[in-house]
Amino acid sequence: MSDSFDMLRLLPILVCLGLTAAPAFGAPLDKLADALLRDGSYKVRVRAARALGTAGDRRAVAPLKFALRDDHPLVRAAAAHSLGQLADADAVAALCALRADKDDFVRRTTEHSLATLGGVGRCGSGGAAGLRVKVQVRGADPSQQAAVQRQLEGMVRARQGMTLIDEVGKEPGIELMVSVSSGVRGSGASTAVTCAMNQSVFDLPKRALRGTANPSAEVPLGADASPALIAGSQQQCVDALTGVVFDALVAYAERR
């Protein structure tokens, strides 16, 4: 990739997450994915994550990758374990990022799953080795902007072969610039949360533009969505796109 990100991977990710209108699964996979991503009980989400891991269907990879950002550590650990069971190479980057999780059990489960996918050495494979990365996030919502900044910086730190830098200096590297936004469309029975990110990658120190992309997503909420549900769904929407942005960054770095 030299002029644009390969965003063809984005559509199946969003479909599998239920963020577009197109159905991704047949029963019971659709019910399991919905329970994993939407149920209010962490115990239900854990059971759904485990069931998806034993299903043996690679279409479960996308919702399981999203569940790696769940608020509850047991859900994150269950999703990491199931990704190891599925042994799908598409999960490697997400698992590598999870090695920086604050929970020890999640980290140990992640290391075990990575072992089934070729070991932690895969976290630093390809052209990303030794790469210096600067992350800059902008957004109208300060808390949302700060959350995306922390997530992307954590993913870069956890990725072997990448070094996070604070300032643009004379040494070579890349700068990831992201603008994040979210909103609410419709009302009543047709309420939906939307989110979007505008991302650009620059080569340093000259800041030559090397790639741009504009991933977006939508989460239908149904009737009578509460303010709390809307706020939580906005964050989930943004979190999903944050993972897409990082995966695109890794893919770019490995093709440099």
Image (cartoon, rainbow, N blue to C red):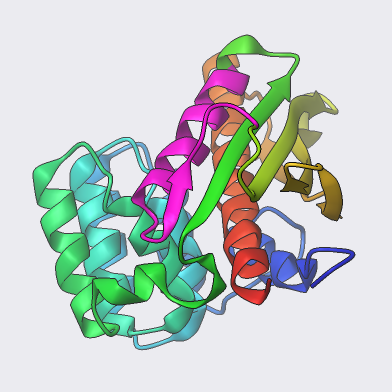
Q: Which residues are magenta?
A: 144-168
Residue at the spot 36% in from the left edge and 36% down from the top edge: 40
Query: Based on the displayed image, in which of its 4 quarters is residue 55 positioned?
Result: bottom left
Query: Based on the displayed image, in which of its 4 quarters is residue 248 positioned?
Result: bottom right
Residue 100 image offset from top left, x and y in percent: 28, 45
Q: Is residue 53 above or below residue 129?
A: below
Q: Quadrant of the N terminus?
A: bottom right
Residue at the spot 62% in from the left edge and 69% down from the top edge: 251
Residue at the spot 26% in from the left edge and 53% down from the top edge: 99
The answer to which of 78 and 181 lies nearer the viewer is 181
Residue 95 image offset from top left, x and y in percent: 35, 62
Residue 236 image offset from top left, x and y in percent: 54, 37
Residue 180 image offset from top left, x and y in percent: 73, 30
Whether residue 54 is visible to the viewer of this picture, yes or no, is: no
Instruction: Give the main secondary structure of the magenta stretch.
Output: helix
Q: Is residue 90 left or right of residue 113?
A: right
Q: Quadrant of the C terminus?
A: bottom right
